[in-house]
Structure formats: structure tokens, C-alpha cells
């Protein structure tokens, strides 16, 4: 396995947890770290909200020493705001600042940020250079391969990034029009990172050894980033590291392991947010843990209505009983 160094920060491996809005909060990042992630990312934060001292946005970026190194990801549409937000992220304790140039969400695009920036190379260059000069910690970017199929803008963006002092580029190898669905374009990814002078990390559709190997077979791929494939499946990091280092295939997570992760996630969430809010916020991710369980519809209903610890206990009891029936 290749060593991955981002500026002055060397990771223990090159398998990274992706930033996911509304998902990669501190509780989930701690679980991914315990599962072997070499680097974790916060949720994407609005640069404008940060410089206006929005407390809810700052809360997204609270960092634990147990998750380091950690990257804070920010988005915005102008160089001044992004540079000021990068300074705030640094002061909060970020080890790395990442600039989002890949989010296709309407609320991000309408402020001229995220994937919208890929059509304005001049502004991309201005933002990257300004942010890099504003902080002494490494700055990275995350982009899409392009906006529409056949439109590979990543090659030019990577060159701009190198010339601006960016230390790593993550390329989501799906087009913005695909969202999070469909196969990544491996050929375009290979073309985009060919001969790059900084690390290029692959993202998009990585869920197992086969999909990881598809990217690592590309000579200029420096690492991989896993998003939805890691939720409720945290051993994927150690499993892929073992496979890539020693060609040894470890067993996938059992249902009992997933149940234990779900319980640990709930505890982390309660500790961080409080009992009621912690369980309510768990609803958006809890279904990932149980998607292949018996009576999944009933389980999802219980998840979507849980508010109290008693509700959670009933949920776990129901899941355990169903899991035991599935193994009989």
C-alpha cells in the first residue's frame, strides 16, 4: 500500500472517510476512526456561516483528539470568505482544510459554490491561491470528474491545484449529473490524474475489495475515499487495508457486529447531543446498519419514531430477535 502524505501530515493508511452532509458528525467520525480510517472529514460547512459566527455551523466542526488527523471541509463562492473561514477552521483545530468543488446540491450551487465553481477556472485559481496563503496547515480540494458525462474538467483543475499550493486532490469519479448513483468513470479518472505531482485520491462507488482495486489498479491513484459504503460498516477500512497490503480477504461485518456498532453510535450520539436530540439525529443513519436484516420495513418504522432510550432498547431487542431467527 502506498504511503499518503498531505503536506507535513503522514497518514497511517490511504483509506479515507468521505465528508457527508448531515452524516459525518463527531460520533460517526469516531466510529470510522476506530474502524481504521486513515483520515476523517467533517461535514461540509458554509464559509459564510462560519465568518458570521453561526453557532450551529461551528458545532459541526467540533473536533476530538481521538479522531486526528481530521479535515474540516468548507464551501463558498469567493476567495475572501473562503480564506477567512479557513482561518476559523484552523483555529478550531483542523489539521487540514478542504475546499469543496464537487457538491451538486442546489443550495450550494445557488451561492456559486461546490460543483458550480468547476465552470469558472479563473475563480477556482483565485480561491485556491488565497486560501493556501491564508493558513499554514495543508489545504486540499474535493472535486467531481466533470459536470456531464464526457466532460472531464478534473485534468485542468488538478493542474490549477498544483500551481496554487494545494497538497491533495480528491476526485469523485462520477459526473455531477449522476449524483451518487451509477458507475464511476475509471478511464476519465486515470486520464485526470496521469502524471500528477500531488496525491490524487479516488472517490465514488467504493464499497468492497473489487471496487477499491478498480481504482488502485490505476498507477497514479494515491488513495481511496469511502462514503456511504462505510456507514454502519466501519471495519471496511481495516478490511481493505489488509486486502491491499497482504492480498488477504477478511470476513465482512456480521449482523452482531453491526448491532454493536449501532449501540455504540447511539451512545456517542447521546453523549454528544443529549438523550433526545442524540437519538433523533441517529434516525438519518440508523437504517444503514440494518438494511439487510429481516423485517427491515418494521425496523425502519421503529427507527423513524424513536425518541427515548426505551424506544432504542425496544429497537435493539427487535433487531436482535430478528437476527437470531435469520441465523437459525
Image (cartoon, rainbow, N blue to C red):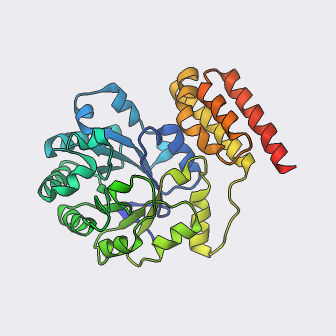
The number of discs equals: 0
* Residue 14 vs residue 138, the one in the foreground: 14
- Asked which quadrant contains residue 280, the reply is top right
**In the figure, residue 74 lies in which quadrant?**
top left
Q: Is residue 321 above or below residue 126?
A: above
Task: Compare residues 207 and 241 and report the one nearer the observer.
Answer: 207
Q: Residue at x 55, y 52 (%)?
A: 230
| 326 relative to 62 in the view: left or right | right
The x and y percentages for residue 133 are 17, 52
- x and y percent of residue 7 in the render? 32, 61
Q: Is residue 63 left or right of residue 53?
A: right
- Is residue 82 visible in this depiction of the protein? yes
- 142 shown above or below 242: above
Q: Residue furthest right?
A: 328
Q: Position of residue 257 (x, y in %)?
A: 71, 48
- Residue 272 at x, y = what percent? 52, 29
Examine the rendering and report whether any part of residue 7 can be seen.
Answer: no
Q: Which sits in the foreground, 12 or 54?
A: 54
Q: Is residue 58 above or below residue 225?
A: above
Residue at left 41%, top 79%?
219
Q: What's the residue at 25%, 60% (across, down)? A: 166
Amino acid at each position: 500500500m502506498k504511503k499518503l502524505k498531505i503536506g507535513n501530515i503522514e497518514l497511517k493508511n490511504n483509506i479515507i472517510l468521505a465528508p457527508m452532509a448531515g452524516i459525518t458528525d463527531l460520533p460517526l467520525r469516531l466510529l470510522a476512526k476506530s474502524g481504521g480510517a486513515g483520515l476523517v472529514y467533517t461535514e461540509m460547512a458554509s464559509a459564510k456561516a462560519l465568518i458570521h459566527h453561526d453557532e450551529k455551523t461551528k458545532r459541526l466542526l467540533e473536533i476530538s483528539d481521538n479522531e486526528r488527523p481530521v479535515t474540516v471541509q468548507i464551501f463558498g463562492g469567493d476567495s475572501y470568505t473562503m480564506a477567512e473561514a479557513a482561518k476559523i477552521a484552523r483555529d478550531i483545530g483542523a489539521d487540514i482544510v478542504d475546499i469543496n468543488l464537487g457538491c451538486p446540491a442546489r443550495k450550494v450551487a445557488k451561492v456559486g459554490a461546490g460543483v458550480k465553481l468547476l465552470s469558472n477556472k479563473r475563480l477556482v485559481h483565485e480561491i485556491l491561491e488565497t486560501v493556501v496563503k491564508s493558513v499554514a496547515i495543508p489545504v486540499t480540494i474535493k472535486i467531481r470528474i466533470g459536470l456531464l458525462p464526457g466532460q472531464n474538467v478534473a485534468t485542468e483543475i488538478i493542474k490549477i491545484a498544483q500551481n496554487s499550493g494545494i497538497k491533495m486532490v480528491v476526485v469523485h469519479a462520477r459526473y455531477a449529473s449522476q449524483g451518487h448513483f451509477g458507475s464511476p468513470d475509471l478511464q476519465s479518472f486515470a486520464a485526470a490524474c496521469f502524471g500528477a505531482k500531488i496525491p490524487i485520491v479516488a472517490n465514488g462507488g467504493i464499497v468492497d475489495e473489487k471496487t477499491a482495486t478498480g481504482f488502485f489498479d490505476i498507477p497514479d491513484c494515491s488513495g481511496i475515499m469511502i462514503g456511504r459504503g462505510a456507514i454502519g460498516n466501519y471495519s471496511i477500512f481495516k478490511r481493505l487495508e489488509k486486502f491491499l497490503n497482504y492480498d488477504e480477504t477478511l470476513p465482512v461485518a456480521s449482523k452482531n457486529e453491526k448491532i454493536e456498532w449501532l449501540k455504540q453510535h447511539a451512545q456517542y450520539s447521546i453523549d454528544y447531543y443529549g438523550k433526545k436530540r442524540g437519538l433523533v439525529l441517529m434516525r438519518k443513519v440508523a437504517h444503514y446498519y440494518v438494511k439487510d436484516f429481516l423485517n427491515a420495513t418494521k425496523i425502519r418504522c421503529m427507527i423513524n419514531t424513536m425518541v427515548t432510550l426505551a424506544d432504542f432498547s425496544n429497537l435493539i431487542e427487535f433487531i436482535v430477535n430478528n437476527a437470531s431467527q435469520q441465523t437459525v
